[in-house]
Amino acid sequence: MIKRLFLSPLLLLLFIHLAYPQLITDKIELVELEEGINLTSPYHTTLTFFYNLERGHFFPDRAAKTFDLKSVKGDAEDLTVKLQQIFEGKGIVIRTSEVPNDPDFADSTLNSEQKFYFDRIKLPAIFLEKKGNQWKFSAFSVSQIENLHRETYPYGTDRLLNILPKIGTREYLGLQLWQLVGITFLIFLTFLAHLVFTFLVDKGLIYGLDRLGYGYIGENYLLPVAKITSIYLIVLLLSFLIRILQLPVEIYAWIIPVFDTLKPFLITVIFYKIVDVVAAYFASLAAKTESTLDDQLVPLIRKTLKGLVILVGTLFVLRDGLNFDIIPFLTGISIGGVAIALAAQDTIKNFFGSIMIFIDKPFQVGDWVTSGEIDGTVEEVGFRSTRIRTFRNSVMYVPNGKIADAVVDNHGLRQYRRFFTTLTITYDTPPELIEAFVKGLHEIVLAHPNTRKDYFNIFFNNLSAYSQDVMFYIFFEVPTWPEELKSRHEILIQIVKLANVLGVRFAFPTQTLHMDSFPEKTGLTPSYPGEQEYTARLGNFVRSELGQKNS
């Protein structure tokens, strides 16, 4: 029965009569394209790309015009074919009615950026971007094609994409000859794999356990697990190979979700059967004791574990197979368990807190986290609490419920580490020397191997009570705190050396006492000229300094 249900989708492919594979499924009238190329809008760029890769209109050189090839190496025509294969392998249906035809299209969900994504869930790295007056696949998208192609066709299966079509391209029932041969081969491979796994289980595993005296265990507990495992391995194998056939995308659109749903579902069934094996083992241990408490505990453990397996398996089926957001689902379960939560509020809170930690993964073992009074490195995440080693070398056990409700700052996920300080220099430092000092600081940052080169701020930005202040705001690209400290040390040493070479003196809080008058000495109080003199000096400054910069 299982084999018939499993093979029916594949057998159905033999009777489907469709046109050749085409990612644009809406019935449209092709616009007149100048030499087959029109990049004025996302709609026309999409049409140009796929239209020039159709079997009856195969011009990959024209399709390559839709790529932003800046800083991209490789054969552009080969990349166009690979991108089309990625769309087909991912089962993405592109309907022209959903592609914007506005040359000035801006995505309101992306801060009005002029980008268009085909599928943000399955292909977040592939999008069109407006460059000047043309819409093209972005340079980033083009750079990701090779990686996405290997991901879509793993384990060397991408080589078969070029080998199998050599069998023949004549069409029968809407499919090419090599595709029909491939489908026949997959059906044969399914039967063969099932026979091999059945033989290994029946004649190998069960026979061996029977010789060892565990025939009952093998027949009643291990055999069901092995059979479901064999089906899972067949599904896993077919999920890799079915993409090579390059079937019409309308078929992929429902085949791939079926496989994505079957894989977590079969894993759930496997673990559901394994619970029986574990429960049988604990039952055998409980039978050897005099207490009857553990005999009552085994069925409770079995039911609890099975319920947990079903719950977790359902969540994975919803997330991986049906692409549902499971967080609201978990919220609904927590609301429905209010009565239980009132009886064991802290325990339930910590339990669900641990689940949220495992699902959301706000941190992992080895990360440095801070949250309120919590400051340390995560050593272990349990079902009730999380163990954190502080920098005082003490250990904190934090309930997971508290962590789930708190704002956690995960320093381990930082891509860059900020370093900000103010360099104070004396007031007798001339402007020309300040300019040279700031330029030298820029060179120090650019020359250091661990600094972020695309964003930093070094400016003379303040006149304080005792110094002229230079803001020094940079980022380090290092994974650990010791490496950050080492980089800071190297940068500061270079700053001190630069100051010594240029003759820059660093300022510190001081007080200078001036005597306004002294016997037989001229007073320090300056004498000021009249208004006409100041007006003349101001005019000279504006003409020499401000006028020069404005020009």
Image (cartoon, rainbow, N blue to C red):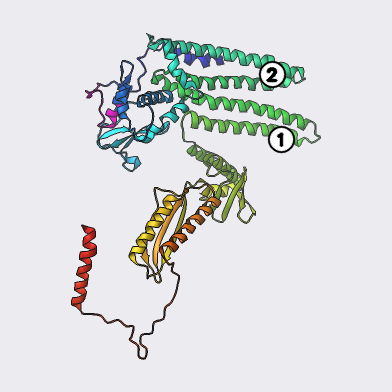
| Mark 1 or 2, closer to the camera | 2
Q: Residue at x 50, y 48 (%)?
A: 478
- The residue where tag 2 is placed is 205
Q: How many marks?
A: 2
User: Where the N terminus falls, by quadrant?
Assistant: top right
193 or 16, nearer to the observer: 193
Q: Amino acid at mark 2?
A: Leu
State whether residue 363 is above or below residue 464: above
Label 1 packing within 10 angstroms: few (<14), some (14-19), many (20+): few
Magenta part mainly helix, strand or loop?
loop
- The residue where tag 1 is placed is 297
Label 2 packing within 10 angstroms: few (<14), some (14-19), many (20+): some
Q: Amino acid at mark 1?
A: Leu
Q: Is residue 41 magenta?
A: yes
Q: Residue at x 65, y 54 (%)?
A: 394
Distance between the alpha carbons at the discs numbered 1 and 2: 31 Å
Q: Relative to 541, is 275 on the left or the right?
A: right
Return the disc, 1 or 2, that comes first in the chain's sequence. 2
Question: In the rendering, at what x and y percent does residue 277 appear?
Answer: 68, 27
Disc 2 secondary structure class? helix
Which residues make up the magenta segment? 29-46
Residue 176 in sight here: yes
